[in-house]
Image (cartoon, helix red, strand yellow):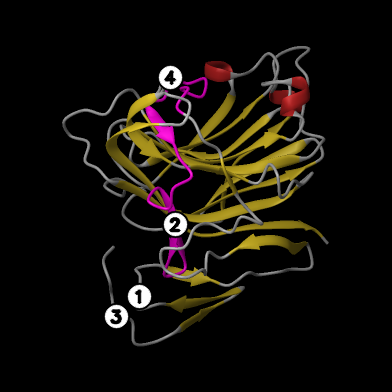
Amino acid sequence: MKTFLHPILFCLLPGLLIFNPNNDSATQQPTETSEWKLVWQDEFSGPKGSPVDRTKWSAEVGGSGWGNRELEYYTDRTINAFQSEGMLNITALKERFTGKDGVTREYTSARLSTRNTFTSTYGRFEARIKLPRGQGIWPAFWMLGADISKVGWPRCGEIDIMENIGKEPSIIHGTIHGPGYSGAHGITSSYSLKRDELFADSFHTFAVEWEPEVIRFYCDKLHYKTMTRADLPERAKWVYDHPFFLLMNVAVGGTWPGHPDATTSFPQVMLVDYVRVYQKA
């Protein structure tokens, strides 16, 4: 990661931007308002090279394709997910790897979730991320219904706060999935950067505000889409009234992004400055 020296501090309301000479990000401090109160956070401030905080995240492990024909094996190794200089690094590698289940893949990465540690019904869910790049690379910050083991997917519901695929380096997608509107038929919208700007070139903040009967999508504090029950197919069920948990991952390949090709370099890293959850005051 490139290092820049910033000799001064800039104060911007409603938060304070602190320029850190050890990285090229500006870490915005948690901001509470009369409307939103911080209830959960991870600032990834552990020692350099340390694993994620296991009281907050669990590594989901395996190379089954995860329903998307993904090509990576998700591991629980610190080489694929670690903390450094106030950042979470989720790293996709090109390497031949065989898991304990006997499955062999040509790529590894990490998929982290709060399924066993934190769930929430409604709130503002926010992360500041610098995305990886490249054909076949598929980073995501998203949520699943906590009842998935009981009712299955997509009846549990899914909220994709941010997804990006390598062949669209300036576009992110926000999507909801439920019974009758899942997979390629999910209710979706997108947000695009200005011409020649790439999500891999700098940090951006991705968020949803989820309340009863409404989900609002944001990129860099810009509200770009609102989804309600009225957006669903006729007679489809709104399944966003129960606890959800958070996930972050970097997939390699899959039915949507396609395979990596000769233009794709490795390793590819998703840098996460923070993840924060707010509830209505």
Q: Earlier in the sequence, mark 2 or mark 4?
A: 4
- Give percent across and percent down for residue 244: 73, 39
Q: Separation of disc 1 and disc 4 at Cα?
A: 38 Å
- CA–CA distance between discs 2 and 1? 17 Å
Task: Please provide the residue range marked out in magenta.
Answer: 63-88
Residue annotated with mark 2: 82
73 drawn magenta: yes
Of the residues shown, which amino acid type is indicated by label 4?
Arg
Q: Is residue 187 left or right of 78 when viewed as pictured?
A: right
- CA distance separating discs 1 and 3: 8 Å
Q: Position of residue 255 (x, y in %)?
A: 41, 19
Q: Nearer the viewer, residue 5 or 233?
A: 5
Question: In this figure, which residue is indicated by the disc labeled 3?
Answer: 5
Residue 275 horizontal side relative to residue 89, left or right: right
Residue under numbered circle 4: 69
Q: Nearer the viewer, mark 2 or mark 1?
A: 2
Residue at point 43%, 24% (across, down): 102
Q: Position of residue 277 (x, y in %)?
A: 68, 56
Question: Disc 2 marks which amino acid?
Answer: Phe
